[in-house]
Every structure is written in structure tokens, then in C-alpha cells.
Amino acid sequence: MTDTQKPVHLSIEAQGMLSFLLDRYHEIKRLGIDSTNALAFGIKPDQLSPLMGTSNPCIAYKLLCNEAGFPGQEESCGNDLDEVRNWCETNGLPGLHCLAVNGATRFPGSSYPTRPGMLLSIQWRDDIVALLDTFSGEMPTGENWRSWRSKNN
């Protein structure tokens, strides 16, 4: 974070999601999974699990909330994921929020942030590619994100 940047407030739920998604990102990279796996629509919802036994890096909202320690809050996790997106953006990182999807549709919900005039499906694809294929900078872990400062800004 630079001296001119304001700290990003994260709710306790967003902190749990951020920590989990950071660790998931590192596991995805360790396994060599890329955007092709995330964007494949043939993956069944039950394969959207926190376990990396499948090649799909996306996680259903319900499972993300469970893993973050807030079971039953999947209907309201959009605000928390937006906080995660804002934290990533403020720190010069691609948005980890794109890894979270609706378990039934395997696609982000309608509150997924898009640029003006951009279709949700295209925005999500662009975000997945930016995170899994394009980004080559340093990413903090779930354990050290609170003390981590971006060298990418």
C-alpha cells in the first residue's frame, strides 16, 4: 500500500473469505490450473468444492462461506466479495472474487461487478484470465495478508 492509499475496511466475513481465497489461489497455481479449467461449463456443481481434487478452481458461495467460517450466509456474501475485490484492487492485485460462483449455475450472481456496458459473462471471463493466466506478480497468503504490502503498485 502506498502512503496515498487509504486502508480498505474488511468485515470479519470478508477477512475470512480473503484469507481462504488467497490460500486457494496459491494451491491453484501450485497445481498449474489455468482459466480454461475455471471457464469450462461441463463441471458439475458438486465439483465446486474447497478441495483441489478437481481441476475447477471456482468455489460455490455456500462452500466459500462454510470455509470462511460463516455457514448459511451465501445469500448475502456479495457485499463481502465486493470488499475482497476492493482490497485486491487497492493493492494492485487481480480480483480473487471471481473464484466464487453460484453452485447451481456455476456462474457469478447478478451483483458481480462489471464495467459499464460490459456483459457479466465477458467481465467474469476477463477477470478469471487476469487472475489465473496473466498475473505474474507477488500474491500474499491467507496467513500474511494483513502485514503484506504490494510491490506491484
Image (cartoon, rainbow, N blue to C red):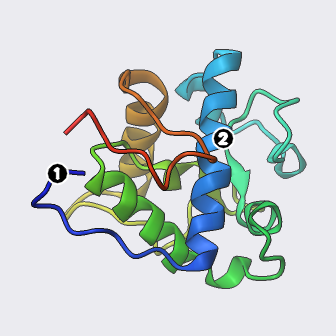
Question: Which residue extends farthest top?
Answer: 32
Residue located at (46% from left, 75% from top): 111
Under mark 1, the amino acid is Thr
Q: Quadrant of the C terminus?
A: top left
23 or 44, nearer to the observer: 23
Q: List x then y, in percent, for residue 128.
A: 47, 39
Q: Quadrant of residue 76?
A: bottom right
Residue indicated by mark 2: 23
Q: List x then y, in percent, for residue 95.
A: 42, 49
Q: List x then y, in percent, for residue 56.
A: 72, 34
Residue located at (75% from left, 69% from top): 65
Q: Quadrant of residue 113?
A: bottom left
Q: Is residue 26 left or right of residue 117?
A: right
Under mark 2, the amino acid is Asp
**Secondary structure state at the residue bearing disc 2:** helix
**Secondary structure state at the residue bearing disc 1:** loop
Q: Is residue 72 above or below residue 46?
A: below
Work out how far the residue at label 2 is from the one at label 1, CA to CA, in angstroms: 24 Å
Q: For label 1, count other residues whose C-alpha is less than 10 Å away and answer few (under 14), some (14-19) or many (20+).
A: few
Residue located at (84% from left, 47% from top): 49
Can residue 107 be seen from the camera position used here? no
Q: In this rendering, which labeled residue sits more in front, label 2 or label 1?
A: 1
Residue located at (83% from left, 67% from top): 66
120 or 25, nearer to the observer: 25
146 or 134, nearer to the observer: 146
Q: Is residue 54 left or right of residue 135?
A: right
In the drawing, what numbered circle is on residue 57? none
Q: List x then y, in percent, for residue 17.
A: 63, 62
Is there CB contact under 8 Å for labels 2 and 1? Answer: no
In the drawing, what numbered circle is on residue 2? 1
Question: Which residue extends farthest left?
Answer: 4
